[in-house]
Amino acid sequence: MLEYALTDDLSHTDAQLTMVENTVGSIIKARVYLEPNSTIEQAGNIFASNKDLHAIAVVDETNPVGIIHRHQIMDIFVQPFGRDLYGKKSVSRFMDPQPPIIEHSTSFKEASRYITKNTNTTFIQDFIITKQGQYAGMGNVLSLLESITTLQINQLKAENTRLSTELDVTRRLQQMLLPKEHELSQISGLEIAGFMEPADEVGGDYYDVLKHGGRVKIGIGDVTGHGLESGVLMLMVQTAVRTLLAANETDPVKFLNAVNSTIYSNTQRMDADKTMSLILLDYQPDDKNTGTGGTVLLSGQHEEVLVVRVGGNVERVRTDMLGFPIGLEENISEFVAQVKIHLNTGDSVVLYTDGITEAQNEAKILYGVKRICEVLEKNWQKTATDIREILIEDVRNHIGKKKLQDDITLLVLQQK
């Protein structure tokens, strides 16, 4: 009788036991076993020499026929005269004849299901691992759980890396497609200053200034939420607006409805519960013979548009009756209306997203439209660039050390 019956038949080579990662074969902890006629005393000696061993397989030639646990041996030995009475008895009389047996190629997931269904899953519960039905070694539930946890962590890390790459690509695309300073400087009649800062890696805010065939189209909007889906939707809107402008669509109602129809179709296909506020402005400078100034035709639903007149008076133009949330319905043409605003030299139009008005300080007080108006009233005579910098700085001062909760976007248009 051998306490450690590591014969050639059972001592598989490393090549034979090469296991696929994420299978139970990779968590074999011990290959110790007893034969059916091994004694309780021999089992006790094995447990005494290996404090980390909680169970020993009982193997008849190469076939596992049972399992004996440390606590069984301890229960026997603590009885009066237990060692003397039972020490010479064979382990086959005390073993569990129906041990949990799992083939080495079984995945962690399937092994976990089997253990949960068939055994008492204490953290020290051991099970037998076989290779093509022959004894290969022992595994235990704790190791299985640790391996499953490690696998899940690695999967999450890989997924996070993939998502981080996708987010980074989307963020870079967004930044690349924002209007450049030299493009804004070429807009006749206006000085334009824009700012965008996402709360996450990818924002759901949108703004653009486009010039095509003598026409100037200005847009600002806010996709619900933020993150990858919102960022992708923002890029869709930017593409749709550019495409329609290039196609010479001049009717504001048809233009906005076409953008909406595109976004509605895409969100349905994506099964994404996303909508967007969006206003579009068509700017036309006055005829040179009639003086200096310009006209803005405004359509769409978004935040209030602020018109800053020379002298500091701020007009608040509501947009809730000029459109409908983009992507909520397939056709919004009946909801679209226009407002015409005339600008004189020195007048400004300020556009923004709710990331500014809803910015909170540590006392949870919102920045609000009123505060924007106060800043504009005091700084109406400044350039568009200066107004942008002053407003953003004031918002940051209001937030203080509090983390940015939403994307913030600001666009200042000033009539030359």
Image: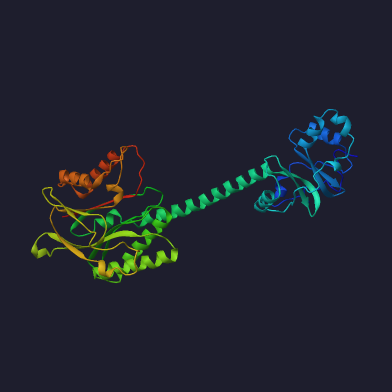
Is residue 195 at least partly visible in the picture?
no
Q: Position of residue 161 (x, y in %)?
A: 51, 50
Tell me which residue sits at (22%, 46%) in the image.
372
Q: Quadrant of residue 265?
A: bottom left
Tell me which residue sits at (85%, 49%) in the image.
62
Q: Quadrant of the N terminus?
A: top right
Picture layout, residue 120 above or below residue 294: above
Tell me which residue sits at (18%, 58%) in the image.
189
Left or right of residue 379, residue 140 in this image: right
Picture layout, residue 191 above or below residue 332: above
Q: How is the image coloured?
A: rainbow
Of residue 63 and residue 161, the one placed in the foreground of this image is 63
Left or right of residue 149, residue 372 in this image: left
Q: Position of residue 131 (x, y in %)?
A: 78, 52
Q: Quadrant of the C terminus?
A: bottom left
Tell me which residue sits at (69%, 49%) in the image.
115
Picture layout, residue 26 above or below residue 290: above
Of residue 393 and residue 362, the one placed in the foreground of this image is 362
Q: Residue furthest front?
A: 80
Q: Quadrant of residue 205?
A: bottom left
Is residue 221 at least partly visible in the picture?
yes
Q: Position of residue 192 (x, y in %)?
A: 23, 54
Q: Position of residue 320 (x, y in %)?
A: 24, 59
How many numbered marks does the figure carry? 0
Of residue 21 and residue 142, the one placed in the foreground of this image is 142
